[in-house]
Every structure is written in structure tokens, then in C-alpha cells.
Image (cartoon, rainbow, N blue to C red):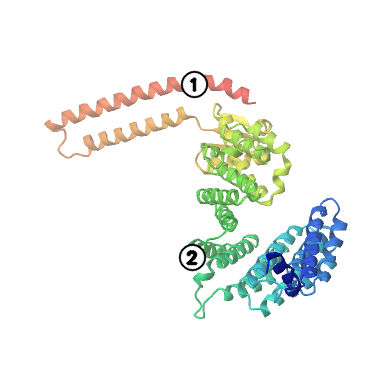
Amino acid sequence: MSDDDFMQDSDQEYDFEYEDDEEEDTGDVDIENKYYNAKQTKTSDPEEALQDFLSIPPLEQEKGDWGFKALKQAIKLEFKLKRYQEATEHYEELLTYVKSAVTRNYSEKSIDNMLNYIEKGYDDPKAVQCIEKFYSLTLQCFQSTNNERLWLKTNIKLARLLLDRKDYHAVARKLRELHNACRKPDGTDDPSKGTYSLEIYALEIQMYSETRNNNQLKVLYQKALKVRSAVPHPKIQGVIRECGGKMHMSEENWKEAQSDFFEAFRNYDEAGDLRRIQVLKYLLLTTMLMKSDINPFDSQEMKPYRNDPRISAMTELVDAYQRDDIYRYEDVLQKNTDLLADPFIAENIDEVTRNMRTKGVVKLIAPYTRMRIGWLAERLRITEPEVMDILSFLIVDGRVKGRIDEHKGVLELESREDADHVQAITVLSEAVGNLFNAVFKSTDGFQSGQGEFMNSMADQIADIGSLDDTMRSMGSGKRGRRVGLTQRAY
């Protein structure tokens, strides 16, 4: 048989059969194309893209990846378009895919990313209600599937939402529930859940910081710093350190506050969190309260922000403070009233302003012995009662020697020459007393060995007399010069 005959026979006798799956493959390809086409148009035409995404789940014979992906995209678009009710309904449908249609790890990561996405809508009250509903649906779903990790993550997000709403009683209840979930049966912290424990501590520290419960805040702050079994996100460390800095500020522990604010800034900066700008302002504020002459921008981490326009006002304040320029300092405050929009800065800037004015008073009164309170008030651009308050503090603190005549509205300073004169007379008096005791109270009279002593005492009296004369002449000359200065103070 020739080869041609064999091939002819083969065509007749052998027939290959293939599985008929072309229609199924074609269907998956159509769904995939529809999904990616919708993704391309969601920016230019979100309405059309939304309809395309919602049309994909019914095309699948069984729930699968493409329906899950399409619903995720649809929910994000609905949330962006503020269709919160529709977003909630479709999210509830999305959760039905979790049990069987997609893998556990993929579903957990997708749901967590979804919750992170919708957290951006905290500013809208309707969005907040929708977010709370999302959390509730998630907890119900994953509690039944025994997914502890996502249950913890979602509860932490819910606690954060409640904290933003300042519902402190609900926050406290939720935090107790979370703490119990992160403990072993014997009541000790579970090291395997250290990261979650640190996030819970951060939320609790924020709550006590806002409610100004410093006793509890201090205990929790120390506990959080001792957690070593966690690898937390830098933002969590930033939150803890920021609250620690505020705690130290309330105790006027400026050095520790500066250290914590610097660590908070460094962690926020590492996390790329915008909170770093506000904490940087706190750090500059603390620098002034410490009365430090060190430029905070000399550090490697802060150098890139030296000329940042967002902190230019605080930078100018620090510069004026370190140069003792009270007028420049006051001008910066008046032109940048938005600085006081932050309650923490508004609360602590008064102490800086008082320090600045105190330094101004000390510089102004230095050349004079007598001056009007009103003149000081005019020069410092503040009221007379404020000047008297500063002067009273300086006198009580011993930094100024003088007295205030409230009736005349005059400050009178003690002359240094007068003080030296009084000191010289005191020394003379003591020397004369010693001489009297040596001469008249000795029963034996003058002894041969006392001649040298008497000569020594006489020399001391002579020296004191000459010192007294010198001080009188110096005092009269300096008082003459002071008269002119005193007149200028009026």
C-alpha cells in the first residue's frame, strides 16, 4: 500500500474528537474584556463604567473572581459618587463571595483595602453612617467565618471611627473588647498579637489625651513603649509619641516633650503622613518654651522642611524669639491668626508670648532706676495690668530689685551703688564691734601680743573708710548720669 493510499484510508477511518469548551472560554474572555474596558472609562465616564461593572456579576454562571472584582470597583465608584445606599447594598452582595468564590487571603486583603478606601469619607456625615454600616456587615460576615485577623482589623477601624465622633463611652467599650481579644487565657498580653495591641494602645492613648486624663495616659504611654513583640506601622508610633509629647507639655516637661515630638515627626515623615507638618509646628513651639538657642532645622530629618511655606509662620516666630525681637514676634502672630486655629498651639503659645514680653521688660528697664508703668506698656504694646503682672513676677522671682508704686503707676528700682554702700557700712560695723570686744571686754587689758592685732584692725577700718568715700563719690557721679536716663523713661 502506498503512502497516499494509507492517508486516504486514514481520513476515512480516524476521526479526532475535541472537547467543546470554546463557548465557555469565549464567555470568560468577554467578561474580562468588559471589566478592563470599564476600568479604562471609570475616570472619563464614571456613570457608564459603573453600569458596565454592575453588568458583569450576572454574566457569570457561578460566582467567581470577575464578579468579585467588578463589585469592588462598582462600590468604590458609588462611594465616590455619594450613592451610599447603593454602595451598602452592593457591599453586602460582595461579602457573599467571601465564603466560596475567592480565596481567604485574597478576600481578606480586598476587604481590608476596601475599608481603608472608604475611610477617606470621614468629613461627610452621611458617609460616616455608610462606613459604620460597612464595618457592621464586615464583622457579621467574618465572625461567622472565624477570621480573627480581619475581625480585629475591622474592630480597630470601628473604634477609630467612634473616637473621631468623640463617642468616648462607646470607644471605651470597644477597646475593652479588643484588649480581651489580644490576651491569653491567663490575662497576659499575647505576643503573637503585639501589633494589634500597640494599635489598641494608640487609640486608648488618643482617647485619654483628648479627655485630659493624664494619670491613665501616663500609665498607657509607658506600657506602649514597652511593647517589643510588635512591628508597628510608623504612623502608630507617631500617634503614641505625639500624645506623649502633649502629655509632657501639660506637665511643663519641655525637654521630654521635645524628644517625643521629634520622634513623632520622624515616624509620620517615614509613613508619609501629612500629620508630620502639624507635629513639626509643635516641635518648634517646644523649642521656644525650652528657651533654646539651638536651631531645630540643623537635624538631618528636618532640613528639607526649613523653607516649607506650611510652617513659615512658626519658623519666623522661632527666629524672632531667639533674637529677642518682641515687635517682630507680635507682628508675626497678628498676621498669622490661623496658627491659633489649632487648640494645642493656642493653649501653649500664651506661655511663649509671656516669656517674650518678660524678656522685653527686662531689657527696657535695664538702664533706668525709675519709670512709668504706662511707658513700658506703650513700648511693649500691651496693657498696664499686663505689665504690672510681669513686673510683680520678676520682683517675686528675685530677677528685679525694686518696688511698684501702684498709686503713681511707677516702678522704682534699687540702685546697685546704694546696695554696695550698705554692704560697706555693714562690714565697717562688724569691724568696730570686733575692736570693741578686743579692747574693752578683755580683763587683762592690752597684751604685748595684741599690738599686731590692733594694727591690723586699724588698717581694716582705714580701708573700709576709704571704700566708703569711694562709693559715695561713685554713687553721686552715677546718680547724676541716671537722672538723665530716668527722665527719658518718662
Q: Quadrant of residue 240?
A: bottom right
Q: Residue at x 56, y 73 (%)?
A: 182
- What residue does disc 1 label? 478
Quadrant of the rendering where the C terminus is positioned: top right
Q: Mark 1: few, some, or many residues within 10 Å (few <14, many ≥20)?
A: few
Q: Secondary structure at mark 2?
A: loop
Q: Work out whether residue 197 or residue 53 is closer to the camera in this orientation and state it.
A: 53
Q: Work out whether residue 472 or residue 205 is closer to the camera in this orientation and state it.
A: 205
Q: Reply above or below: 395 against 472.
A: below
Asked if one can make out residue 397 in the rendered structure from this viewpoint, the answer is: yes
Q: Reply above or below: 245 against 127.
A: above
Q: Mark 2: few, some, or many residues within 10 Å (few <14, many ≥20)?
A: some
Q: Residue at x 50, y 61 (%)?
A: 225
Residue 372 position within the rendered picture, expressed as x and y whole percent measured from the top left: 64, 31
Residue 365 position within the rendered picture, expressed as x and y whole percent measured from the top left: 57, 30
Q: Residue at x 72, y 68 (%)?
A: 5
Between discs 2 and 1, the one toward the N terminus: 2
Residue 254 position within the rendered picture, expressed as x and y whole percent measured from the top left: 53, 48
In the shown orientation, is residue 305 left or right of residue 97? Answer: left
Label 2 is placed on what type of residue? Ser
The furthest residue to the left:
448
Q: Work out whether residue 145 or residue 330 is closer to the camera in this orientation and state it.
A: 145
Numbered tag placed on residue 229 in the rendering = 2
Residue 350 position within the rendered picture, expressed as x and y whole percent measured from the top left: 64, 45
Looking at the rendered image, the disc whose residue lies closer to the viewer, 2 or 1, is 2
Q: Secondary structure at mark 1?
A: helix
Q: CA distance from mark 2 to mark 1?
A: 71 Å
| Residues at discs 2 and 1 in contact (Cβ within 8 Å) | no
Numbered tag placed on residue 51 in the rendering = none
Label 1 is placed on what type of residue? Lys
In the shown orientation, is residue 87 left or right of residue 481? Answer: right
